[in-house]
Every structure is written in structure tokens, then in C-alpha cells.
Image (cartoon, grey):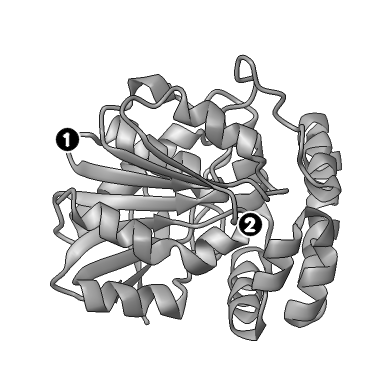
Amino acid sequence: MSERDVTLRDGRTLHIYDEGDPDGKPVVVHHGSPSAGHLFARHVEDAQERGIRLIGYDRAGYGGSAPSPGRSVADVAPDVEDVLDALDLDRFATWGLSGGGPHALACAALLGNRCLAAASLASPAPWGADGLDWLAGMGEGNVAEFDAVLEGGEALEASLGRDAAEMLAGGAAELRKAILSVLSPVDQAALDADFGDFLYESMRAGIGERIDGWRDDNVAFVRAWGFEPADIGTPVLLLHGVHDLMVPPSHGRWLAERIPGVDARISESDGHLTLLKGRVPEVHEWLLERF
């Protein structure tokens, strides 16, 4: 794995992961919440075979990246632009899963002069979205998490600290127990040793030392994103599973109704984690067709 730090225009640093075909088409990956920018080995292999340069990064406050308290979802756009400039890259495509989904959409909306296409996998919709009960259909763990987000302050810090300690207490098996309330049966089945270990290690890297990135993601999700999905002019692929207890399919359907020209694929067989485990080659193929 090729890793380095990139210094941004405001002096912060982002830790990036540069994998796949070094001469391939650049695709930027936005990780979920909470996690780090580690790239799953199967995704790297697929990128290598397809001629994709796969670029991950720790979002601000996660892992090796400096925090940016008070950031909005839209603030990811200049960060990504600075990473592209540091790597001497111009046009790119992007995908993001779960908490990374809004950040991929931000690139589509705000970097349209450079972003050729974006894919959103199990993305939440904006908080307070008209006609959407945002928490409806979420598992118990996520409802409790966002109750703490809305309370804010020390309550949020304490809640996320407890959750992080529980999730990271004992490897992939303990992580599975800690998040069981948000795992549908199909997602439980997806957590084999290889994929479970990847998720655990990525979470450990992302929030093992501090919960800044997780906190700042959650606060950003309950505030204005800084752009409107309806204003996106870049081609977007949207994937969502009906068996998703982390981000219910109602979020995907809401976004699908509002992103112009979106290629929306609501899967009757997928949950949340199954999209990350099994659907990324499909995403890569779709993105490459837009170059």
C-alpha cells in the first residue's frame, strides 16, 4: 500500500492511500462513518485489472488526517481538489459508501469541472429532508447514536467514546456483536473472516486514537450539506439495498427522486455492507464508462 500525507491549502494534512494501476483512470473513494480510508484488497485487485488508480483518504479527523471541526459535507470538495493537485491529476471519478456517500455527491455537485461521474452507495439523505422520516427504519444503535448527536456537546463525546471502545474491544467478532442491532440478516452473513477483519482494522485505524472524524461527520450530517442534490449536473449512479438497517432504503429513494438523471438501482437482495463487499466491481465498470 502506497501512503503519504498531502498538505492542504489551509495547512491541514490528509493521509491518502494510492493503489491500483498507477497509470490508470483516477477514482477517489470516500469511506464510511466511522472508518479510515483503507482500501479493501478485492477492490484494489479489481482496480488493477480494470486500469483504475484507486485513491482513498482518511477524511478530516479520522486516522492520519488532521481534524477540521465544524466542517460541512461540502468542505470535502476543496480537500479532494488539493489531493488531485498534489498527485498531478485533473479529471477523476468518485464513489462513496454510507457516510462517504454525501461526500461523493459533494464532489459531483461542486467539482463538476473535474468530476466526470460519481457513485453513491447506501448514502443518507440530507437531515430534515422534505417528506422523509430520517430515522425511520434504522436499527436501535443508529437511532441512539443520532439522539446523542442532537444532544451534542459532552453527551455526544461520551456516547461516541463508549461506542468506539465497545466496537474495538476485541477484533471482528466483538465488532459484529457491538453493531448487531444495525445488521440485517444479509449483512450478518456478509461478515466473513476476510471482510470482517478489513472492517475492524479500518475502524481501528479511523477511530482508535480519537473520535474527531466520527463526531464531525455526524454533526455535518444533521446540518445543511452546503449544496442541493437537485443541483448535481454530473452523472450519478445510486445503489441502495432494501435490507439496510444503517441507512434505510427510504433515503436512497428520496435521493433518487431528486438527483437529475440518476441511474438508481434499489436492490431487493442487498443490505448495507453487502454493497461494499460485492457491488464495487459494478461501480468501477460504470464509472470507467464515463471517462
Dot 1 crowding, Cα within 10 Å, few <14, some 14–19, many 20+: few
Residue type at mark 2: give it: Pro
> Which residue occupies the extreme top position in the image?
130
**Any mark on residue 176, and which?**
none
- Asked which secondary structure carries label 2, the reply is loop
Query: Residue at horizontal 21%, vertical 58%?
Result: 86
Above or below for 195 versus 93: below
Above or below for 270 versus 261: below
Dot 2 crowding, Cα within 10 Å, few <14, some 14–19, many 20+: many
Residue 18: % across, % down: 31, 71
The quarter of the rendered structure image containing the N terminus is: bottom left
Q: In this view, does 127 lie to the left or right of 57?
A: right
**Residue 26, image quadrant:** bottom left
**Residue 148, image quadrant:** top right
Query: Residue at horizontal 58%, vertical 71%?
Result: 202
Residue 193: % across, % down: 66, 85
The residue where tag 1 is placed is 113
Query: Residue at horizontal 79%, vertical 79%?
Result: 173
Q: In this view, does 88 lie to the left or right of 222?
A: left
Q: Can residue 285 be seen in this view?
A: yes
Residue type at mark 1: give it: Asn
Q: Which of marks 2 and 1 is nearer the N terminus?
A: 2
Q: Give the spatial CA distance, label 2 vs label 1.
A: 29 Å
The residue where tag 2 is placed is 34
Q: Is residue 4 left or right of residue 197?
A: left
Residue 46: % across, % down: 32, 75
Asked whether 174 or 273 is in front, the reply is: 273
